[in-house]
Image (cartoon, rainbow, N blue to C red):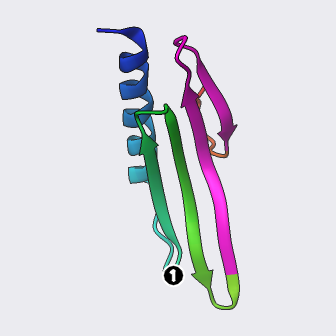
Amino acid sequence: MDKVIEYKKIVRELLTEIAAMALEQDGGIENQLITDDQHGHYLLFYVGWEGTKYYYASFAHLDVKANGRVWLQHDGTDLPTAA
């Protein structure tokens, strides 16, 4: 299998596992996993309202480049994502 395709699969599975561990907040805050296999962008974030406060923040953002490199753009978890 092409390494870019394999890396995209690994990143997608990793963020899916992290999303499953992230607890949904009571109220209007939800976790969202965005995967774009065509362009190699993967984002896990939470968004929503808690009372009068609005939240929009990233848990993790990874890109898989055409040359096979994986860029960890942001890791807001306490997990060893880059290990």
> Is residue 70 placed above or below 41 in the rendered structure?
above
> Is residue 20 placed above or below 6 in the rendered structure?
below
> Where residue 8 sits in the image (x, y, percent)?
42, 26
> Is residue 23 placed above or below 19 in the rendered structure?
below
Residue in front for this viewpoint, 83 or 16: 16
Q: Identify the secondary structure beneath mark 1.
A: loop
Q: Which residue is drawn at 50% across and 84% down?
A: 27
Per the picture, the main secondary structure of the magenta-coloured stretch is: strand
Quarter of the image that includes the N terminus: top left
Quarter of the image that includes the C terminus: top right
In the rendered image, the residue lying farthest to the left is: 1
Q: Which residue is drawn at 64% across and 53% down?
A: 58
The reply to whether residue 70 is in sight is: yes
Which residue, given by chain and number where applicable, does mark 1 sit on?
Answer: 28
Asked whether 73 falls inside the magenta stretch, the response is: yes
> Where residue 50 sits in the image (x, y, percent)?
62, 84
Q: Which residue is drawn at 41% across and 33% down?
A: 38
**Total count of labels:** 1
Residue in front for this viewpoint, 63 or 76: 63
> Where residue 59 sits in the image (x, y, percent)?
60, 50
What's the residue type where badge 1 is placed? Gly
The reply to whether residue 83 is in sight is: no
Give the extent of the magenta segment.
54-75
Q: 10 Å neighbourhood of mark 1: few (<14), some, or many (≥20)? A: few
Q: Which residue is drawn at 45% across and 30% down?
A: 11
- Judged left or right of residue 48, residue 11 is left
> Where residue 28 sits in the image (x, y, percent)?
51, 81
> Is residue 19 placed above or below 7 in the rendered structure?
below
Asked whether 61 falls inside the magenta stretch, the response is: yes
